[in-house]
Amino acid sequence: MIGITTTVPLEIPLAAGKQVFDLNNLFINHEEPRILTEEAELAGFPRNTCGWIKGIYGIIKRLDIRELIAVTEGDCSNTRALMEVLATEGIRAIPFAFPFSRSKQELAAQLEGFAQAFGVTFDQAGAIKKDLDRIRAKIVEIDRLTWQENRVSGFENHLFLVSSSDMKGDPAAFEAEIDAFLIEARNRPPFREKLRLAYVGVPPIFTDIYSVAESLEGRFVFNETQRQFVMPSLCGSLTDQYLSYTYPYGIFARLEDIRTEIERRHVDGLIHYVQSFCFRQIEDIVLKKELSLPILTLEGDQPGPLDPRTRLRLESFLEMLKARKTR
Ligand code: SF4
């Protein structure tokens, strides 16, 4: 079992026979995620540390995970500090970096070093990629059913897309789950919500943002980061695939994708989710400068439902969008 803190070239550890788990997913799906963040604070993590970092630390300790993949570039400095703490506790970390330059050559070199660290060849990773791409294509179909046929809720979309980072630790079982869901979704009547929403930013620490939006007649038809985890471009080579993945390469790489998708999906308004104490909050300035549709920024700290103030802000935003649409 090897843990990941963000999306990595999954093909390589899988080719080495590892079972890969995204620690973010294990943390947020834990029955008491808040206790995990409190345990991290008891271990010395400052209160003003990102909740995801504290949760990841908490779940590593709970599950006694001994090996991790550390993304040293293209993730965040909080993760780097987390790795340093874990190193003092004897936890082994295998590094991988998404070069900020987004240079194909540099990324190819990184992938080569990463494959060597796991003792696998590119051909072996390529064979795994074929299997994963088949699963990814099915998740892309779930995404299409969300925005084009309106048969999938924003939360279902979020869940399937976000789970592609580790294929739930068992690609074959995950594929079977996707197959069953696709049959069900294709045979449903379409949703008829009043508002089409985009979700941009890191996945939410809030547990009910999708259901609250739906209760207010808005459905998320685009989950930006979660969709990126799927590697939706389905490129032929490993290098091209992780080059087309926008998330590690800064806000401008992401903006291009966001613009294309909000237009294609006829989005009425955008929610920018930011995590308390995360450097990505600053990117909100660029998003608001560069995008012309209405944007609401929501900040979350601890896992759990929307707090009353955030819920009220979401409600007012959706009311404003509805009024704008009927004008
Ligand atoms: S939310 Fe921000 S600070 Fe927290 S782990 Fe993600 S990138 Fe790092």
Image (cartoon, rainbow, N blue to C red):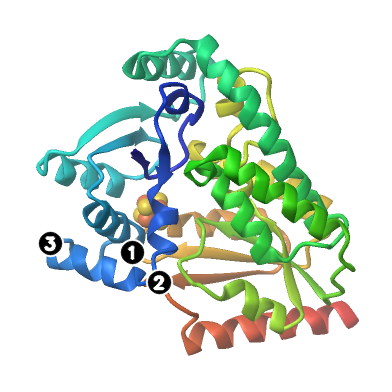
Q: Is residue 243 above or below residue 144?
A: above
Q: Earlier in the sequence, mark 3 or mark 2?
A: 3
The reply to whether the residue tagged 1 has its Cβ within 8 angstroms of ligand 1 is yes
Could you say which quadrant of the image residue 18 lies in?
A: top left
| Residue 211, numbered circle | none
Question: Residue 205 location in percent, x, y?
Answer: 45, 67
| Residue shown at 78% from the left, 52% from the top | 182
The answer to whether the residues at label 2 and label 1 have Cβ atoms under 8 Å apart is yes
Residue with the most extreme left position: 88
**Quarter placement of the N terminus:** top left
**Which type of secondary structure does the marked residue at label 2 adopt?**
loop
Q: How far, Cα to Cα, is label 2 from label 1?
A: 8 Å
| Residue shown at 73% from the left, 55% from the top | 181
Type of amino acid at the residue the image marks with label 1:
Gly
Q: Is residue 201 above or below residue 191?
A: above
**Quarter placement of the C terminus:** bottom right
| Residue shown at 36% from the left, 28% from the top | 96
Q: Is residue 237 above or below residue 222?
A: above
Tag 2 residue: 303
Q: How far, Cα to Cα, is label 3 from label 2?
A: 19 Å
Report the front residue among 305 and 283.
305
| Residue 51, numbered circle | 1
